[in-house]
Image: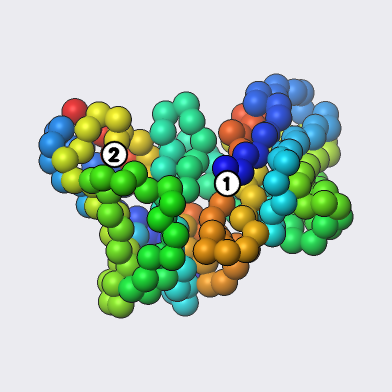
Amino acid sequence: NAGVMQNPRHLVRRRGQEARLRCSPMKGHSHVYWYRQLPEEGLKFMVYLQKENIIDESGMPKERFSAEFPKEGPSILRIQQVVRGDSAAYFCASSPYQYEQYFGPGTRLTVT
Amino acid sequence: TQLLEQSPQFLSIQEGENLTVYCNSSSVFSSLQWYRQEPGEGPVLLVTVVTGGEVKKLKRLTFQFGDARKDSSLHITAAQPGDTGLYLCAGETAGGTSYGKLTFGQGTILTVHP
């Protein structure tokens, strides 16, 4: 069984550009979560999605950030007009049911 | 806002020693998960504890969930250099639409010297 896949692993964007981060959950998992790990900080919850639905986006910044998990294809975390403060590692996790979340390798976003 | 205090932040010990990492909160969690994270990689799930007072063992690692489901501990017996890494605890929010949301501790960086 393949694990959670994330791509790209590393992404460099200039200020003002858009960043798109992709996450393919483990086979059979219908719950997807996105977390952000800022330098020198712990992992922080951003958003929880199920297929075609956002369940909890309480950790998402109100502006510039959006997430989706379409019926077909990977989950996408989209950051518009990136700023230097968006530089971080972004992790996706998936779960078949409650309690256990399996993490992908992360996408390291660098904003120059 | 739920908080999870993890201690100690750094731990440097000699091979063969025992150690305990603690996670404490004033909030109740529906479950608590322990992860290990290597540099440049995502957290890897070690164990999930669900029931208050539950104890789980994974070889030399023993995990305990507090009776009130507000705290947890990770005990490693006879540590080895291969145990070196970042250990994270994460509590899952109980109930409501926050179901599944994990609150992470700050992590414990463990170094085991040969």
Foreground of the two, A37 or B10: A37
Instruction: Give the quadrant of residue B45.
Output: bottom right
Residue occupying the point 15% across, 32% down = A15
Give the vertical position of B79 relative to B27 (above or below).
above
Is residue A73 positioned above or below B83 on the image?
below
Q: Is residue B4 visible?
A: yes
- Residue B103 tag number: 1
Q: Which x, y percent locates residue A105?
A: 42, 50
Binning the other alpha carbons within 10 Å of mark 2 as few (below 14), some (14 to 19) or many (20 upward) gives: many
Residue at 77% over, 28% down: B15
- At mark 1, the secondary structure is strand
Instruction: Residue A82 in the image: state x and y as whole percent.
Output: 20, 38
Residues marked 2 and 1 touching at CB (< 8 Å):
no
For residue A81, the mark is none
Secondary structure type for disc 2:
strand
Residue A99 location, quadrant:
bottom right
Q: Amino acid at mark 1?
A: Thr
In terms of depth relative to the viewer, which is nearer, A67 or A26?
A: A67
Q: What amino acid type is highlighted by mark number 2? A: Leu
Q: Nearer the viewer, mark 2 or mark 1?
A: 1
In the drawing, what numbered circle is on residue A109?
A: 2
Residue at point 71%, 30% (across, down): B7
Separation (CA) of disc 2 from disc 1: 22 Å
> Left of A29 or right of it: where is B59?
right
Q: Name the spot of residue A73 as percent of width and height, x first.
A: 28, 72
